[in-house]
Image (tube, helix red, strand yellow):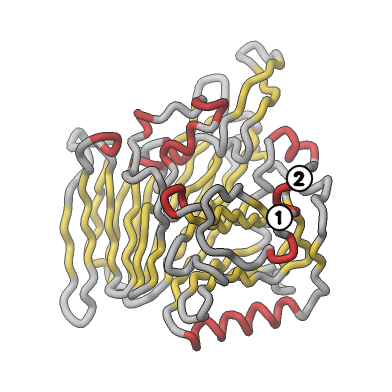
Amino acid sequence: MMKTVYKIPLLDPQSTEGFKAIQLKGDSPSKWSVNSYVLRGGLQEGVQVVEINNSKLSFAVLPTRGMGIWKGQCGEVKLAWESPVKDPVNPAFINLQDRGGLGWLKGFNEWLVRCGLNSMGAPGMDTVLDYSGNEFEVPLTLHGNIANVPARAVSIEVTDEAITLRGEVDESMMFGPALRLNTEIRTEFASGALRITDTVTNLGNNPQEHQMLYHINYGAPILEKDARLVAPYKQVAPRDPRSVEGIDHFDSYGAPEIGFVEQAYLYQLVGTEDRQETITLLRNAAGDKASLLRFSLEDFPCFTQWKNTAGEADGYVTGLEPATNYPNSRRFEREQGRVISLAGGESRSTQITIEALDSSSAVAAVESEIEALQKTVSGTVHPQPLSHFSGS
């Protein structure tokens, strides 16, 4: 029977204590630890951090930044990337409207960052209703708000099996969207995996649109020349003319290249017949280091591969992006019928598992699993963008 060892509120909206600093440690042989603290100095001033180490996998969660995951480590497998943005940025210093709606990029340096909840994707104009029910045009910014909204409640639970961090983040306004994210990030002792269970609830009475994308980003040592993305697909299409230039090697990566301009590829993945579960794998050239994502296509029917193999100082990175829809403007995605609507009081729960692999045998086993899924369909790689995927 599972036993609770610790259950501690780190941030309680009903308390005046503020964010709680703790240090918890497990005894040998399970040398786990949990540390929470607040960063000081510069743009990171006031950012809350919760570091979790299950004795094999360690990672740092940022409650101040929408419960995103800053970075991780599993043995020699680094789960992070080197962004020009060096520190976690307090949302108080972010103006999402900067540079025509690209201000989100001024805080972009996490391993995992959520995009949503009401909108995500490319910036652009959209039509909403004002407080009198009249339609008017508003500019939506890149990837929405949730990554720059501090959590209002955070707690840690340690049992004899796992460490679980929970948080609650509200994206709400009067006469507008009122959405709440409840997240649970769970990792078992001595495991290379973590599981994220997210529930988004419409707190209001009226229907609200909802979009969600997980921007999961990798640099070296997994990303390198001849690294590969292995994924079972029905269709793959380039996002735009620039991405067309790399379609012949969309699933492989080059070395850092100064002046490289990003490319993106939009996937319709293959899932298992019963539960529509799928898996994607990013592996290094040697095939002895990798990271995988497991999720259901019922939760995340759309998948994007973002390639930015620029010079190292400019952010040598790739993003694996399971999502409710493709990261185009919300207006375009609505026209394609891919934007979810939550009724008043309705909740939607999703789950994704991320795992680091640190041996050739583990990587080969997952590649075989993906190959078996791929054999169930004949995948198509389109040489040009598809109008219903990206409209480019």
Left or right, 85 with respect to 136, comes to left
Mark closer to the chain start, 2 or 1: 1
SS category of the residue bearing label 1: strand
Residue 93 picture location, percent across and down: 36, 29
Q: Residue furthest bottom?
A: 361
Residue at the spot x=51%, y=25% of the render?
97
Q: How crowded is mark 1: few (under 14 residues within 10 Å), some or many (20 or more)?
A: many
- The Cα–Cα distance between marks 2 and 1, rounded to whole angstroms, is 8 Å
Mark 2 belongs to which amino acid? Answer: Ser
SS category of the residue bearing label 2: loop
Badges 2 and 1: C-beta atoms under 8 Å apart?
A: yes
Q: Name the residue under label 1.
A: 266
Number of numbered discs on residues: 2
Mark 1 belongs to which amino acid? Answer: Leu
Residue 45 picture location, percent across and down: 25, 36
Left or right, 224 with respect to 154, comes to right
Residue 251 picture location, percent across and down: 65, 67
Residue at the spot x=56%, y=85% of the render?
365
Q: In which quarter of the image is the C terminus?
A: top right
Q: Mark 2 points at which residue?
A: 390
Above or below: residue 245 compared with residue 210? below
Above or below: residue 392 compared with residue 232? above
Residue 325 picture location, percent across and down: 68, 48
Above or below: residue 161 compared with residue 255? below
Left or right, 32 with respect to 184, comes to left
Rendering quarter of residue 108: top left
